[in-house]
């Protein structure tokens, strides 16, 4: 199968890594990159050995697919332009800044019959890949995603910048169950938007999630704990590894005295691979007809909807506190 002619739109902190991986991929032919900052666009293009396109229409005319890594506020306009031209799109998360824009993108992709994938890269995390075969109807999920402050991403609340990664994972783990109740609190300290948030989410299937995200931490933390009827997962998403403490069969009749009489510890390790490279590979293969998108536009829309519910729950909670005597 011939390499897929592809372009990258937006080569800032994340998009430049899209360009780097695609330039090295035997499945893709990186035609060029586009960025509103011409000097940055040329610098990245020179570094990866491709062409800088100052005109977006020209790039879209020369490719069959694009990855989009621009600020959230521009997702809808650029995504729609690409989809209307029949170009497959990998849109970095969140899919859009509003549900109306997300619905427009999903509908346009369906109308044109072209793939729309959303960049929830944690689906490709080594810890998630290693745990997948052991997952069985999780009942409770707890996540902590903490990051030192940086200006990148502060155009949106931490819920849309960081927490949405875990909200997507939780929706995936719970089989896409609908959230019935969302309670949340948070605070804006270093930016005009929420910099820290915590949410408790209950789902129609009885599962519960407790999710924390902060961009004010001293250290980077990405932990996910999953409880199901036959055991417990502790996953370090930053390291891409973890463990599964699985109940031993017949432990009740075995005269167990300690934890390791009851459970067996399974070390979770997947073949080492760059999660972003795997995500881009999956997108290219989906465009080439090698399977559906790993994170569809509809799933990206669902994660966005839940993130916006969390943000609204924080707002309503703060309003309630201000209204108290």
Image: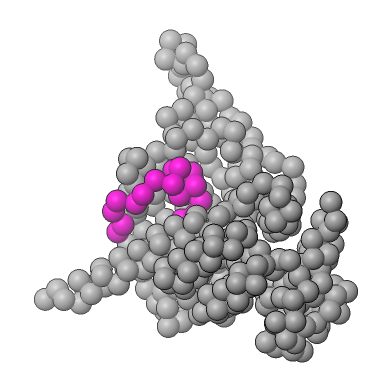
- Residue farthest toward the left in the current orientation of the protein: 325
Left or right: 324 with respect to 140? Answer: left
Is residue 10 found inside the magenta-colored segment of the image?
A: no
Give residue 48's quadrant in the image: bottom right
Left or right: 185 with respect to 71? Answer: left
Residue at position x 54%, y 59% in the image: 110
Is residue 172 found inside the magenta-colored segment of the image?
A: yes
Give residue 62's quadrant in the image: bottom right
Q: Give how far across and how far down residue 218 sits, in percent.
A: 55, 68
Which quadrant is the C terminus positioned in?
Answer: bottom left
- In this rendering, does residue 254 appear at all? yes
Front position in the image: 60 or 233: 60
Q: Give how far across and how far down residue 80 sits, in percent.
A: 56, 73
Residue at position x 48%, y 44% in the image: 173
Left or right: 304 with respect to 310? Answer: right
Residue at position x 35%, y 63% in the image: 309
Front position in the image: 249 or 53: 53
Q: Give the range drawn in magenta.
A: 166-183
Question: Looking at the image, is 206 positioned above or below residue 254?
Answer: below
How many numbered marks are there? 0
Tell me how the rendering is colored: one colour
- In this rendering, does residue 150 appear at all? no
Q: Give how far across and how far down residue 171 sits, in percent.
A: 45, 49
Residue at position x 60%, y 45% in the image: 128
Front position in the image: 217 or 238: 238
Q: Give how far across and how far down residue 164 sits, in percent.
A: 48, 61
Front position in the image: 114 or 6: 114
């Amino acid at each position: 199968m011939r390499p897929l002619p592809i372009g990258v739109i937006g080569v800032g902190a994340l998009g430049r890594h899209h360009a780097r991986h695609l330039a090295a991929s035997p499945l893709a032919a990186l035609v060029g990159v586009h960025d509103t900052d011409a000097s940055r666009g040329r610098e990245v293009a020179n570094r990866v050995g491709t062409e800088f396109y100052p005109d977006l229409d020209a790039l879209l005319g020369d490719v069959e697919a694009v990855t989009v890594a621009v600020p959230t506020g521009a997702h809808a306009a650029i995504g729609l332009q690409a989809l209307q031209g029949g170009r497959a799109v990998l849109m970095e998360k969140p899919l859009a800044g509003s549900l109306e824009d997300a619905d427009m993108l999903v509908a346009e992709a369906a109308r044109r019959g072209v793939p729309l994938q959303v960049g929830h890269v944690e689906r490709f995390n080594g810890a998630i890949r290693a745990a997948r075969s052991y997952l069985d109807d999780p009942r409770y999920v707890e996540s902590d995603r903490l990051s030192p402050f940086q200006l990148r991403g502060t155009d949106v609340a931490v819920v849309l910048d960081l927490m949405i990664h875990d909200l997507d994972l939780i929706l995936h783990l719970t089989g896409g169950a609908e959230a019935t109740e969302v309670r949340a609190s948070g605070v804006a300290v270093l930016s005009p938007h929420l910099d820290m948030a915590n949410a408790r989410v209950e789902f129609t299937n009885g599962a519960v999630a407790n999710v924390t995200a902060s961009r004010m931490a001293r250290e980077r933390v990405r932990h996910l704990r999953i409880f199901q009827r036959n055991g417990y997962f502790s996953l370090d998403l930053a390291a891409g590894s973890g463990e599964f403490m699985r109940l031993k069969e017949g432990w009740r009749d075995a005269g167990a005295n300690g934890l390791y009489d009851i459970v067996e510890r399974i070390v979770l390790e997947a073949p080492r691979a760059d999660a972003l490279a795997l995500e881009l590979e999956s997108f290219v293969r989906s465009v080439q007809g090698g399977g559906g998108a790993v994170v569809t536009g509809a799933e990206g829309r669902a994660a966005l909807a839940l993130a916006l519910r969390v943000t609204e729950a924080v707002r309503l909670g703060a309003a309630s506190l201000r209204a108290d005597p």
